[in-house]
Image (cartoon, grey):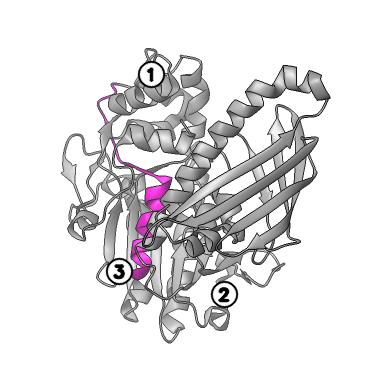
Amino acid sequence: MPASAAELSAWHATPGSFQRLRPPWRHVDVVAPAGAVRAGSRLTTRFALGPIHQDWVTEVTDSIPGERLTDVQIDGPFAEWRHVRRFSPDGPRMSRLRDEVEYRLRLGAAGDLLGGIPIRQSLEHLFAYRHQRTADDLTLHAAYRARPRLTVVISGASGLLGTELAAFLTSGGHRVLTLVRRPPRADHEVFWDPQRMALAPAQLEGADAVVHLAGRSLNAARWTEAVKREILRSRTEATSLIARTVAQLDPRPVLISNSAVGYYGDRGDEPLDEQSSPGSGFLPNVCIAWEQALQPARDADARVVVLRTGVVLSGHGGALPRMLPAYRTGLGGPLGSGHQWMSWIGLQDYLGVVNRALYDDELEGPVAAVAPPVTNREFVRALTRVLHRPGLVPLPAPALRAALGEMGERLLLDSTRVAPARLTARGHKLLYPDVEQALRAELGR
């Protein structure tokens, strides 16, 4: 692992690490301790086995910082379970992680006969994924290990990106405050109401950064005129409130706001970067208004970073899980002609871009949060290789338009070939610049 034994141990002792280690191939909800994981801490994991949901409760029985962390099952699927994580030094700023698992299946010999081999294979698969995810997170945190830990405010913290970002930051030792639209239930929650422009600046005093991710999903419903108005309103109102609040703080935190590559519109094979002009149509107009709503923070001399984000590939949510059923059955294929360009980024690299934006004082203005773009055909070939399935059933453009209307045409058929020019100029390295590597990492394959 790319961290000292003490750093590796500290990462495992944070509640965020449990969230980060959830397997993407199974729906899992994690209830972790509110503070550091220590002897006596209990963790409840709820997972689905088909239509059946089961809780798995484990308790930490032994925790020696820099050496080991042990938990045992209190209630759950196994007759017995004991898991020891051992942390040992392996050179300067390097360490080894050894997971030792002892378990006994229910039903005795019958359980061993029916489930012994599949359970062992499942655990080996799980721990291979967990080790890679741990190494990736520690690599990203190591880039700024010499810098102070931060207090970061996140809007949209209940969505895919917000949930993963909060877990990633807390596992790195940062303090995270989340904006909520209901009465706060915990110390880390702060009330806000964008429709009523309600957010008390005093509640954000001392924040080093605000990461603004809130906004209605683009693919939650067909784009009626009412849905379009809600998409625009949800972005401009919330962003304006965040920007005005940041402008009132002293010192002013860095403001990192999501935007989208939809800013550029349908541009065919034209190479694009942060200096390219906006496109025309609904999505570009939304992105332009979205970014303009940040102006109060700019006028107050806050550092404002606008992440023009491509399709974020994650096994936990977003576009990728929606694609998988068709491709797993062999019924997937190119969308439309398949020649349209797709700007994308893996979840791990999205977190890495946000991490850089928190610390890199030279990074300001629009930043293309993307990996090198691929055509839809290239993406489909990569996905079918990962899934070991054919991808020979194309979905014609007229069928997409008939099924999804303007939403399907804009999100699936528009061609946007955006390169991460500013990140490249800053020397930023992606963990997964290749789309097949990113898909394997996100799907645990």
Q: Is residue 295 magenta?
A: no
Q: Nearer the viewer, mark 1 or mark 3?
A: 3
| Rendering quarter of residue 145 | bottom left
| Rendering quarter of residue 392 | top left
Q: Of helix, strand and loop, which one carries label 2?
A: loop
Residue shown at 22% from the left, 46% from the top: 419
Q: What stretch is highlighted in magenta?
A: 337-360
Amino acid type at mark 2: Leu
On screen, 163 above or below 180? above
The CA distance from mark 1 to mark 3 is 40 Å
Q: Is residue 359 magenta?
A: yes
Image location of residue 113, percent across then percent down: 73, 17
Q: Name the residue under label 1.
A: 333
Q: Of helix, strand and loop, which one carries label 1?
A: loop
Q: Name the residue under label 2.
A: 199
| Rendering quarter of residue 81 | top right
Closer-to-camera residue (102/233): 102
Tag of residue 35: none
Q: Name the residue under label 3.
A: 360
Residue shown at 62% from the left, 70% from the top: 188
The CA distance from mark 2 to mark 1 is 46 Å
Amino acid type at mark 3: Asp
Are the residues flagged by discs 3 and 2 in contact, CB closer than 8 Å?
no
Mark 1, other Cα within 10 Å: few <14 / some 14–19 / many ≥20: many
On screen, 182 above or below 398? below
For the view shown, which residue lies furthest in the bottom direction? 250
Q: Of helix, strand and loop, which one carries label 3?
A: loop
The CA distance from mark 3 to mark 2 is 27 Å
Image location of residue 228, percent across then percent down: 46, 46
Amino acid type at mark 1: Gly
Q: Which of marks 3 and 2 is nearer the N terminus?
A: 2
